[in-house]
Amino acid sequence: MSNDNMTTAAELRELANQQPDSPEAIVGFAKQLFNMTCVQDEAGTKAAVEELGKLAEQHPEYTAVTVRFAQGLFNLTCVQDETGAMATIEELSKLADRYSDYEEVVAALAQGLVNLANRQDEAGTRTTVSKLRKLANEHPNNEVIAVSLAYGLVDLANKQDESGALTAVKKLKKLANQHPDNQMLVVTLAYGLADLASKQNEAGAKDAVAKLRILADRHPHLPELVVELAKGLVNLANQQNEKGATATVAKLRKLADLHPGSAEIIVALAFGLFDLACKQDAEAAEVTVAELRELSHRHPGNEEVLIRFINGLVVLANKQGEANAEATVAELQELAEQYPALFKGNYH
């Protein structure tokens, strides 16, 4: 902890000791310690959590203190590696077993399990998701746990092949149907569909994109769905020939026109254009790279778009051949002088 935070904690601890029967003093101390867990490195967070643990043991009668302790443990998993997070999850599990009727404590355990899953390989993540599913079954009305399970399923799907990802999407859909008013479950379903599209052949990716479009049309107030639709379209284009990719890029272009303020959709369009250029002959690729150039100029602060434009020029130069690539190479050299870090070790 910083010296300022330690001083504040010491003052609050003294106040709490002076007023052992004052809920305000005890809860105030717990709140301050919890706030410390939100802004510090692992060592500082761990120290604050240890103080919270002592306070929770001393005052089991105060629900708010126990909840803050659980939430502090969750915050600790945010800054730990897999080994550290596993140890913290063990402590959270014991706390949740002891206070199983405290929904906020069990929810903190679920959120901590999501952090652990993010740091694990596929096998570890599968085990962690099983624990999340068990919690969700035991607490069917806890929306935080339901969303945590959904995030765990998405993380697991990201580490799996098509078959595993397809199974995860089915579970995500079932979860969303069980909680029809929970918008985050709709969003996580979209995450799963976009990931699934990246692992499928053209027919499968088309089906995933169609489902993403239905979700986006059904929930126009959720901008995340349009972004996932754009990502799904990019994944579809990757599986298509030039003709199919041309039609898919047209859909990406339309999305970008409808959502000009979405940097993520602009990036998706850039990826789609680059993929299309790779499938075209030199003459057609020159037109596509020109569109990438214009996109980069319209979004000068978007490095991802710039990188796709540079990559597009490299592809174009290779298609043009040494005799016809002079202007393209000259443009690449000019960009290399402007953005040397982007070229370092990537282009020869």
Image (cartoon, rainbow, N blue to C red):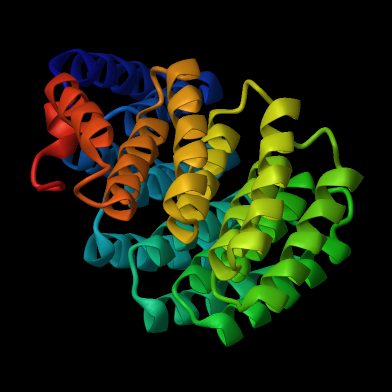
Measured from the top left, where is residue 187 in percent x and y? 70, 50
Query: Horizontal placement of 330 versus 60: left or right?
Result: left
Measured from the top left, where is residue 29 in percent x and y? 40, 24
In the foreground, 281 or 348: 281
Tell me if residue 62 can be seen. no
Query: Horizontal placement of 136 versus 346: left or right?
Result: right
Measured from the top left, where is residue 214 in percent x and y? 87, 54
Measured from the top left, where is residue 14 in percent x and y? 28, 19
The N terminus sits in image quarter: top left
Query: Horizontal placement of 64 versus 281: left or right?
Result: right
* Position above or below: 97 against 251: below
Total marks in image: 0
Query: Horizontal placement of 168 versus 295: left or right?
Result: right
* Position above or below: 307 against 121: above
In the foreground, 203 or 209: 203
Which residue is at the far front? 323
Residue at point 67% right, 70% down? 205
In the foreground, 295 or 246: 246
Residue at point 51% right, 59% down? 109
Tell me if residue 31 can be seen. yes
Residue at point 54% right, 25% down? 23
Residue at point 15% right, 48% down? 346
